[in-house]
Image (spheres, grey):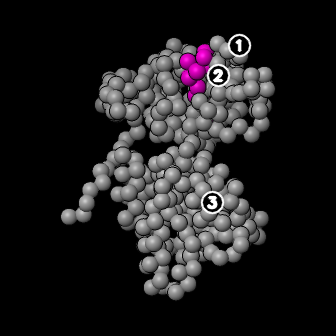
């Protein structure tokens, strides 16, 4: 008996709910591309062997991380070429060029079925650190804006001409989370980070999928960049920060968090302070905030491992309902 994933890959399950429609997007793979060495353009190949925990066999950019496979819409490339760009398949660094699917309109977690391969989208867009030859010639590059990334869920082969189907993320999938520790000494390697691992461990024990842990200096600019990336590109459900919430001049975590917020969610930070007062009166000195950016909840926690465990323990049980509302898989209703 075939699994649900296998049936979907074979096209036997033809309807699902995505972006308010009943028919999920379908497209045609126009090109499969790899680069044999880093720093070289990708070139089209007759087929790609997709490996779990890696990407495409033989691709120099494969690896056991969340950006194993890059995808770009053929339609976006054609539109770009209509302005005289003249780029060929793989020139933007994409592994798969697919006609008929606007990848950027799909949420992270979308599953993509082509050939006998299953991919899962993990990131939308990417930061451009150095402008490529296309940007220098045209004044823009569409990959940072339109490209998406995926990991391989099931091994197999994809060839040009294969049909690709997109399926909406399961509404009951585990919540995703990222943990950021702010510490000058930790970032310099002068102190071991114990706060971040403590938060990550508690989240994993509660059933969360912790997709990233970061250790940053107390620099608000760096924190804002990572909060925006994690919320907008990786679309994680929850971001926890640890540290930088006190009275010291370099404690700028609340200010950086508020700078990227769309909406305030003060009750969470208030609950942490209120319950922490039963442990120590110094809890009133914490300036941590809790906010929402798009569909991501961001919560500031104190810097010590003990305070992280206590603070997260106070709120963890009640977070699920709020995250489900943000995700759209639960309704907001009054307590009876």
The residue carrying mark 2 is 33
First in sequence, mark 1 or 3: give its number: 1
The residue carrying mark 1 is 84
First in sequence, mark 3 or 2: give its number: 2
Q: Can residue 4 be seen in this view?
A: yes
Instruction: Please tell me whether residue 308 is drawn above or below residue 109 in the rendered image.
Output: below
Q: Is residue 92 left or right of residue 159?
A: right
Res 256 label? 3
User: What quarter of the picture does the N terminus occupy?
Assistant: top left
Q: Quadrant of residue 56?
A: top right
Q: Is residue 155 magenta?
A: no
Query: For the residue carrying disc 3, how many other residues have a C-alpha within 10 Å: few (<14), some (14-19), or many (20+)?
Result: some
Q: What stretch is highlighted in magenta?
A: 68-79
**Mark pair 3, 2: CA separation:** 39 Å
Q: Which residue is at 44% across, 78% downward?
A: 274
- Residue 206 location (% of width, % of height): 42, 62
Q: Is residue 52 visible?
A: no
Instruction: Please tell me whether residue 319 is drawn above or below residue 110 in the rendered image.
Output: below
């Amino acid at each position: 008996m075939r699994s649900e994933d296998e049936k979907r890959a074979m096209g036997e399950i033809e309807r699902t709910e995505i972006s308010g429609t009943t028919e999920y997007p379908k497209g045609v793979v126009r090109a499969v591309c790899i680069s044999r060495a880093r720093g070289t353009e990708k070139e089209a190949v007759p087929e790609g062997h997709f490996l779990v925990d890696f990407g495409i066999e033989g691709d120099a950019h494969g690896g056991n991380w969340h950006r194993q496979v890059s995808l770009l819409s053929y339609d976006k490339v054609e539109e770009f070429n209509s302005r005289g760009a003249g780029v060929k398949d793989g020139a933007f660094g994409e592994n798969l060029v697919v006609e008929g699917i606007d990848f950027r309109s799909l949420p992270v977690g979308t599953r993509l079925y082509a050939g006998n391969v299953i991919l899962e989208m993990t990131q939308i867009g990417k930061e451009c650190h150095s402008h490529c030859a296309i940007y220098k010639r045209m004044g823009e590059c569409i990959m940072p804006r339109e490209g998406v990334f995926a990991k391989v869920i099931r091994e197999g082969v994809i060839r040009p001409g294969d049909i690709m189907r997109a399926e909406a993320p399961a509404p009951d999938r585990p919540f995703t989370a990222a943990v950021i520790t702010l510490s000058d000494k930790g970032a310099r390697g002068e102190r071991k980070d114990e706060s971040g691992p403590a938060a990550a461990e508690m989240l994993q024990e509660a059933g969360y999928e912790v997709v990233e842990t970061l250790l940053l200096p107390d620099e608000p600019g760096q924190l804002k960049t990572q909060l925006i990336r994690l919320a907008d590109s990786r679309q994680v459900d929850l971001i926890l920060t640890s540290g930088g919430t006190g009275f010291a001049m370099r404690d700028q975590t609340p200010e950086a968090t508020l700078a990227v917020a769309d909406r305030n969610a003060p009750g969470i930070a208030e609950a942490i302070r209120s319950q922490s007062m039963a442990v120590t009166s110094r809890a009133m000195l914490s300036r941590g905030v809790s906010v929402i950016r798009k569909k991501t909840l961001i919560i500031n926690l104190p810097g010590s491992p003990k305070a992280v465990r206590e603070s997260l323990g106070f709120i963890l049980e009640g977070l699920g309902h709020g995250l489900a509302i943000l995700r759209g898989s639960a309704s907001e209703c009054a307590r009876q």
